[in-house]
Image: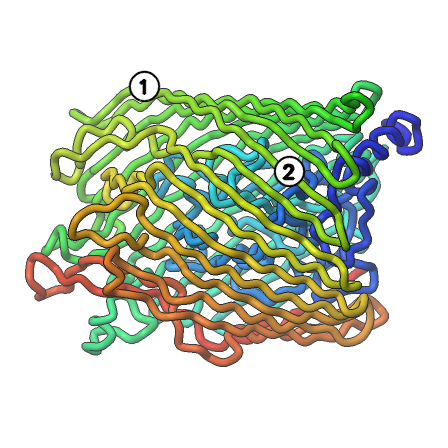
Amino acid sequence: MSDPRSPTVLRLAALAAALLPLPAVAQEAVTLDELSVAGQAPSAPAAFSASAGYPGGVTGIGGALQPVESASGGIVSGAQINARPVTRPGEVLEAVPGLIVTQHSGEGKANQFFLRGFNLDHGTDIALFVDGIPVNMRTHAHGQGYADLNFLIPELVGAVEFHKGPYFVRDGDFASAGSVRIDYLDTVARNVALTSIGSFGYKRALTIASAPLGEGNLLVAGEAQTYDGPWDVPDRLRKLNGVLRYSQGTALDGFSVTGMAYWAKWNATNQIPERAVAEGLIGRFGTLDPTDGGDTGRFSLSGRWSHTGEAGITRANAYLIRYRMNLWNNFTYFLTDPKDGDQFRQLDDRVLGGAEASHVVPGDLFGMPMENEIGVQTRTDSMRVGLFNTTRRQFRSPVLDDQVLETSAAFYAENRVRWTDWLRTSVGFRADGYWADVRSNLAGGASGRPSDGIVSPKLGLVLGPWADTELYLNYGGGFHSNDVRGVIATGDPAGALGVPRAPFLVPSTGYEIGLRNRSIAGLETAIALFRLDLASENLFQGDSGTTEPSRPTRRFGVEWTNRYALTPWLQLEGDLTVTNARFADRVPDTGRRVPDAPTTIASAGISFGETEGWFGSLRFRYFGPRPLIEDNSVRSRATALLNGRIGYAFANGVSLSLDVLNLTNAKADQITYYYVSRLSGESADGVPDRHFHPVEPTAVRLTLAGRF
């Protein structure tokens, strides 16, 4: 390993200090040199603690955290992540300003995401990574970009890096609205064992431990959880989770090998029609098909390697994943089949692998600090994806059953120069190529070998600082891929004809101007104006086996983000995002509103605590009303939630905390859709109606943790 005090490393540190802006982390014990060269992710000051179970420790994101070069990007520490009382693991990502994480089904299903005026469904335009491994699934049985974060262990999170918009060369597929990279700890400062019990059958046990082994460290974590929820048909969630990692050195000069294993099984109460509740057929927490649910498993092996030397910084990571999911849903009840009902099973069974390598070369341009970065990425998915008609989980008939091989490769390059003390630029591009082979297992099924490619330019300019203020201008092209079954589709498997094919890759273009100010001690405030254009929001609808091409869209918006550390033990947060989402074309007699696109998202929070004594947190989240159809004649209701935590940390390492979720017992909705469904006895054409999934009522969770 290179000596961090060697001339080469010090020269790289000096170059990084000249090139890079300060990271968007308020009052955290990280210097630029530490972030750029030592490879340690930011961590909260040692005195800060608002969690019973967060162990702290050393982390390196599988390649160092990237510099923040936009007003809307940032890095959030693991301590800040774990200070948030949450209902489900994925909700910790609401630490990303303007991001909403919700659920419309059973707790084992992937979350629903909303960001920058997008209903991102389960991940269509937000790219998620855990420890360098992509979470989004291509050509998934339930939906393109499906990103199941239920295997996330929040206490293991060392840092979260987020970018919004398609401005960054490392971000490719699914990153038009943004990307989030979650970093796991390499080692923990103190071993942790905790147990939690709570309302509606919630039980959880977790242990995390690390110890020196040879020249490195071994980390082991295990988790088990059960949960029923308030539903008339209990979720009966059963979840097992484990992580095993061996690491040496730092994120810029070392390596790690990590294995993860996750399994879950659950029942599901999906969204229900308002008329069924109004007519007294079911209660607010009832279901119209008690056999909905699913099971899933995810097993991965990954490794990262990095080296800092005379030639610069080289990073590489690779991963191999075995994934399987079964999902039973019934969203329309008796609309298609009045006798046996509309339940269907979605099967996804795949092996995927990929790798990324990059090299950063320091230098100068006529005496001005400069660095060049080049990188390559590749990924291959081999899968069986199927859609089958079922009744009470019993097979009736196939709709789709395909063997798919999908692979991609990308090359990216970027040049970064500091021209003066107040001017920095980045100029880059990425080129992506996709190829797939689809073979139907059904007689008469569609097969084909589609391919496509796209080149995306990326530009950034930073002015300042002046009066502790920096101005950022960003431009970039991006894209998302579509389900390859929709790319080769010649018709609707369910019976309709004339379904158009979807493009393989759909381009997007983003623009942003923003500023970040740190003129008040402890306060970092940022504001960003953005625009994002998508050529089409074509999506393959896995629920029906059809392709549903939408029109081109345009989004304008403004984000205002604030982080204020009044003292090392007291922190305040406040965020506001307002977005205008419209179809970019004009179609006679058709509205221009993008269905389910959020207009207003706001959040606020306060966290306090030290390593000993009282700690706590209070979080408010507002999710504004949304148009549910194009002409805006049907809208959802707003959702406002308040979660709280109070706890005490004893000198012997034992902590006790109480979380109160939905503190005001708001009778709000997690999600709302508007579509046609048919209840038993209704007309054959069905009834258009709002379908909603309610927020869980007030729940308490008590956690006892020990650090040793």
Picture residue at 20% right of the left edge, 71% below the top: 275
- Residue 289 visible in the displayed image: yes
Q: Earlier in the sequence, mark 1 or mark 2?
A: 1
Residue sitting farthest toward the bottom? 664
> Which circle, 1 or 2, is nearer the viewer?
2
Q: Which mark is residue 449?
A: 1
Instruction: Tell me the kind of residue under disc 2.
Output: Leu
Left or right: where does residue 211 sit relative to residue 388? right
**Number of other residues with Cα within 10 Å of mark 1, as a class: few under 14, some 14 to 19, many 20 or more:** some
Residue 224 in sight here: no
Residue count near mark 2 (Cα–Cα under 10 Å), binned few <14, some 14–19, many ≥20? many
- Relative to 207, 364 lies left or right: right
User: Dividing the picture into quarters, in which one does residue 258 lie?
Assistant: top right
Image quadrant occupied by the N terminus:
top right
**Of residues 585 and 336, which is closer to you in this image?**
585
Q: Residue at x 17, y 62 (%)?
A: 688
Kindly identify which residue carries mark 2.
461
Quarter of the rendering occupied by the C terminus: bottom right
* Residue situated in front as seen by the camera: 674 or 446: 674
